[in-house]
Amino acid sequence: MIIGFEDKDSTYAKLLIKLKHEGVTKREFFRGVVGSFLEDNPSFMAYLLDFKKRKNLYTQTKQKILDKERKVSYNTEKQLGLSKDEVNELFDMFDEELGV
């Protein structure tokens, strides 16, 4: 699968330079970012919350819902011994049923 995005050529060049300086390939970088997001890495999620606030993408109501879902997911996983994928599948089913 290929994932891409559009931005200025200068931004892409800066990304390549910064990655080279850090000793990380594009593939490793994007896999790391996506993995951190999907695994709810606390450091990454704190960054994401800060990013959403800076870009005016943050609403307190929506964030409360997301935080509650994460808490329920974590508690359900611990109580039932489910994997994160299984818990996510359950939430996807609930969302589908509720038309969310």
Image (spheres, rainbow, N blue to C red):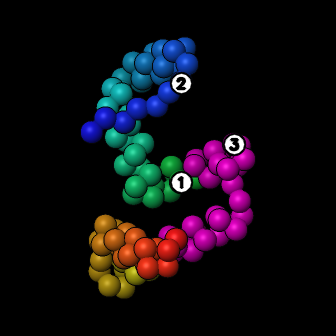
Q: Which residue is most to the left?
A: 1
Does any portion of residue 73 appear in the rendered image?
Answer: no
Does any portion of residue 81 appear in the rendered image?
Answer: yes
Residue placed under numbered mark 1 in the picture:
45
Q: How many marks?
A: 3
Is there CB contact under 8 Å for labels 3 and 2? Answer: no
Type of amino acid at the residue the image marks with label 3: Lys
| 49 falls in the magenta region | yes
| 45 falls in the magenta region | no
Residue placed under numbered mark 2 in the picture:
7
Distance in Å between CA atoms under marks 3 and 1: 15 Å
Magenta: main secondary structure? helix
Q: Residue at x 31, y 35 (%)?
A: 2
Type of amino acid at the residue the image marks with label 2: Asp
Residue placed under numbered mark 3 in the picture:
55
Q: Is residue 24 above or below residue 63?
A: above
Q: Which residues are magenta?
A: 47-73
Distance in Å between CA atoms under marks 3 and 2: 16 Å
Q: If the image is split into quadrants, where does the N terminus sit?
A: top left
